[in-house]
Image (cartoon, grey):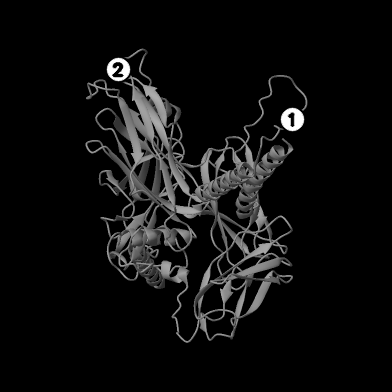
């Protein structure tokens, strides 16, 4: 009986110890930064276009996110990436998609950092970007269940806003989508709906002209940056003077180093709404010169009047 | 039977206590910020006459309020760019209404310069702005500014740690590596000073940081973290902002970012802020944490 009691107490203590360890680990887990996809699952049929959002949960302040994802490129097409509503406002490496390798990657930053959800925030406000996937009409795999996987690679990283560039402890959660073998309804296009809803141009912005020995060998360059809160910025174009429009990124080395051309920069979002910023060169002000020929005419006029006056005086004398 | 009930009760209390402690620790790290959204009532229709009254559309607005330093100019950035400034009153309170905002996710950042020109950290808030709603963000507590009069000193000498914060509050100054927390009080203009005796510290590098306690429940976060050295070794010091301000215009913004971007993945000791041999993400992270717009 005594042995049973001792054994029971040992089991209870062991159980308490295990609970304590889980609490401790759970608390430490809560401290990690989590990158995840939402939705993380779903059933889709050939022809469907759907969005999955890349999100972040954190209790520490972070300011850089490098996300590298792989996806099942044989049964899933990544057709676009939307930066609209992203908390990342500055891009060290804009989002790129490599369909042949099944890779998506970007590096973005938040000046001043992002510290997690604020109490009372109507949210959601922890979005990094949206991947637009399409299920091809013909899938490559012929055997087995078609499960398309999207996962974060180990090279993904998040850095803390601590003035030291410290890497955060990171956990990632990917997604799995079931591809149905047959169509049962009209394919849906979630991205087209987003594009149709977006009728707001990108945010107003300015063109800044700079000249600095530290960049572009001291030649004049411009910097520009804006955001689009709906479908996201697609590209920027520039037009210097009467030159053609051409796609550019910031910082941009000006072709006209004399700064005499008007500069237009056009920000275009994914729904083709655009916002143009303009830099007009200052009009040179020459000192106002009274036309010199008027003085000559006045002098001639005075001369003629004087001659006529003298002539008339002589006439009267005689 | 009674004993089993006792054991079970103990287990429940233990588990709940563990979660409470964990939650409290998490809560203690959180700030005092809160967001509220209000849909204002439309103005009443003008009197007289008939017909249908269509009220004017309600403008989307954000109101930002909190505490900085007395009389200081508060710089407010939206999505990384300076959008407006406002002045804190003698009690360090500030409030600013911002209009012309496109609904969606917005990141607002706030930084302040104190009476001695010391910059605060950049305090950032990311939240969703709803159309035709007034969103108020309150309870913003800018952490105290902090500076030290020496960066290296012999053991036993006094290190003066000082800065500015809200007037007449308790300032908690932390000195690590051995965690020493000392309290001082700010004066009527928010200035605070702590003469710290370095005798208890070992020879080597140490850090110091500060926050203020507004009342029993409300505390600011920590501001900048400064490093100093106890011992004979003289450590050259260059304040982080001057190192990151590559073009020397007293601002850390897109121009400095563009300069750093042109050296991406290349070796350059001037732009390699963490001195690891190459310009990489850590250097961008340091630049973004000093952003002033």
Q: Is residue B179 left or right of residue A262?
A: right
- The residue labelled by disc 2 is A181
Q: Residue at x 36, y 32 (%)?
A: A132
Please report, as a chain letter, where disc 2 is located: A
Residue found farthest to the right: B48
Q: Marks 2 and 1: CB-CB under 8 Å? A: no
> Does any portion of residue B136 appear in the rendered image?
no
Q: Nearer the viewer, residue B206 or A305?
A: B206
Q: Which mark is residue A174?
A: none
The CA span between labels 2 and 1 is 59 Å
Q: Are marks 2 and 1 on the same chain?
A: no
Residue found farthest to the front: A1
Residue A297, image x and y in percent?
34, 63
- The residue labelled by disc 1 is B44
Q: Is residue A63 left or right of residue B24?
A: left
Residue A259, image x and y in percent?
32, 58
Q: Residue at x 74, y 59 (%)?
A: B215
Please report, as a chain letter, where disc 1 is located: B
């Amino acid at each position: 009986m005594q042995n049973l009691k001792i054994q029971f107490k040992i089991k209870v203590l062991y159980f308490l110890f295990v609970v304590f360890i889980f609490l401790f680990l759970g608390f430490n887990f809560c401290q990690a930064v989590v990158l995840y996809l939402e939705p993380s699952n779903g059933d889709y049929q050939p022809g469907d276009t759907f969005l999955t959002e890349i999100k972040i949960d954190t209790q520490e302040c972070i300011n850089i996110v490098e996300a590298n994802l792989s996806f099942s490129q044989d049964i899933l097409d990544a057709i676009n990436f939307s930066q609209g509503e992203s908390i990342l406002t500055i891009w060290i490496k804009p989002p790129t998609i490599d369909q042949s390798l099944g890779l998506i990657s970007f590096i973005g930053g938040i000046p001043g950092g992002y510290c997690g959800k604020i109490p009372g925030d109507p949210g959601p406000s922890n979005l990094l970007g949206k991947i637009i996937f399409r299920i091809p009409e013909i899938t490559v795999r012929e055997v087995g269940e078609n499960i398309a996987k999207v996962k974060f690679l180990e090279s993904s990283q998040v850095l803390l806003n601590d003035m030291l560039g410290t890497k955060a402890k990171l956990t990632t959660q990917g997604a799995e989508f079931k591809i149905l073998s047959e169509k049962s309804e009209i394919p849906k296009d979630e991205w087209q709906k987003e594009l149709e809803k977006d009728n707001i141009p990108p945010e107003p912005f300015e063109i800044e002209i700079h000249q600095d020995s530290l960049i572009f060998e001291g030649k004049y360059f411009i910097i520009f940056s804006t955001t689009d809160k709906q479908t996201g910025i697609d590209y920027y174009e520039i037009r210097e003077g009467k030159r053609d429009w051409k796609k550019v990124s910031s910082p941009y080395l000006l072709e006209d180093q004399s700064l005499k051309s008007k500069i237009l920069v056009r920000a275009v979002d994914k729904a083709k709404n655009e916002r143009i910023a303009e830099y007009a060169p200052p009009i040179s002000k020459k000192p106002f010169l009274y036309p010199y020929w008027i003085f000559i005419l006045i002098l001639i006029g005075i001369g003629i009047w004087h001659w006529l006056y003298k002539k008339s005086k002589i006439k009267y004398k005689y | 039977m009674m004993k089993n009930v006792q054991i079970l009760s103990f287990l429940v209390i233990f588990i709940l206590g563990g979660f409470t402690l964990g939650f409290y620790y998490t809560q203690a790290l959180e700030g005092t910020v809160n967001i509220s959204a209000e849909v204002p009532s439309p103005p009443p229709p003008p009197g007289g006459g008939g017909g249908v009254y269509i009220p004017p559309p309600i403008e989307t607005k954000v109101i930002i309020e909190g505490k900085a330093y007395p009389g200081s100019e508060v710089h407010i950035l939206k999505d990384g760019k300076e959008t407006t400034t406002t002045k804190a009153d003698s009690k360090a309170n500030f409030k600013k209404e911002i209009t012309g905002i496109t609904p969606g996710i917005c990141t607002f950042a706030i930084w302040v310069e104190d009476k001695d020109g010391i910059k605060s950290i950049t305090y950032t808030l990311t939240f969703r702005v709803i159309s035709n709603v007034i969103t108020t963000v309150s309870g913003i507590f800018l952490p105290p500014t902090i500076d030290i009069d020496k960066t290296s000193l012999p053991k036993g000498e006094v290190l003066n740690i000082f800065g500015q914060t809200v007037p007449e509050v308790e300032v908690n100054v932390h000195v690590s590596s051995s965690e020493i927390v000392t309290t001082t009080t700010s004066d009527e203009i928010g200035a605070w000073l702590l003469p710290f005796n370095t005798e208890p510290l070992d020879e080597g590098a140490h850090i110091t940081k500060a926050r203020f306690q507004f009342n029993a429940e409300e505390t600011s976060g920590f501001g900048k973290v400064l490093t100093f050295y106890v011992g004979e070794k003289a450590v050259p010091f260059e304040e982080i902002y001057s190192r990151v301000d590559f073009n020397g215009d007293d601002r850390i913004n897109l121009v400095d970012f563009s300069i750093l971007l042109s050296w991406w993945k290349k070796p350059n000791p001037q732009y390699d802020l963490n001195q690891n041999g190459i310009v990489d993400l850590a250097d961008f992270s340091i630049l973004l944490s000093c952003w002033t717009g």
